[in-house]
Amino acid sequence: MVHIAGLGDARIDELSAISDPCPLPGTEKKRTLLEKERLLYAPMSGVGGIVYDKDAVYIELQGSHSHKDKTAEATEQEELVGKLIGKKQTVDEQIDEQEFRLFSDGVAIKSKDFVQEDEMASGNEDDEDDNSGEEDDSGVDDDDDDAEEE
């Protein structure tokens, strides 16, 4: 029987002996520990591949000795990311500067010269909305302005 303060008496069902994790200095010291010999209970200490930060928990997946041969796909991906990082312009600026030739002797068409039909239609609708006959701040109808322009 074991008495636990605040809990009372408890019966022991199983008991096993483990070696002392902090042996006395007089015993022989080992230079390295095998993985199965590491008996350490130290939560929040950063030992064992888990690092605790103020805001997050990081799990170390690969150690410094885990080198893998890179596949062709991985190197291609790294090369693509490197090219994207090395660019000095935004993607929109790069798209605006792209040229297209329909015929080899034809004029190069830039994407910024091309206006889509829906953009033109929305631009015309905005113009029509401006001339809808509503009064503006001057108190004069837009229809009167149109008559003066003609």
Image (cartoon, grey):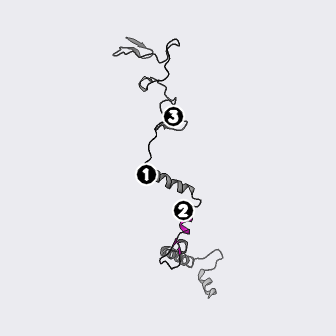
Magenta highlight on residue 104:
yes
Q: Position of residue 140 (x, y in %)?
A: 63, 79
Say if 95 sits above or below 67 in the image: below
Q: Which amino acid, mark 2?
A: Val
The disc, 1 or 2, on the residue closer to the chain's N-terminal end is 1
- Residue sitting at the far right: 138
The residue segment tinted magenta is 89-110
Q: Residues within 10 Å of mark 3 (few under 14, many from 20)?
A: some
Q: Residue at x 49, y 77 (%)?
A: 104
Q: Which amino acid, mark 1?
A: Ala
Left or right of 146? Residue 78 is left
Near-viewer residue (14 or 74): 74
In terms of secondary structure, where does tag 2 sit? Answer: helix
Q: Position of residue 123 (x, y in %)?
A: 53, 75
Location of the C terminus (image quadrant): bottom right
Label 3 sits on residue: 51
The disc, 2 or 3, on the residue closer to the chain's N-terminal end is 3
Return the mark for residue 72. Answer: 1
Say if 5 sits above or below 45 in the image: above
Q: Position of residue 127 (x, y in %)?
A: 55, 77
Near-viewer residue (90 or 12): 90
Snapshot quadrant of residue 13? top left
- Distance from the alpha carbon under mark 2 to that under mark 3: 37 Å
Label 2 sits on residue: 91
Q: Which amino acid, mark 3?
A: Val
Magenta highlight on residue 2:
no
The disc, 3 or 1, on the residue closer to the chain's N-terminal end is 3
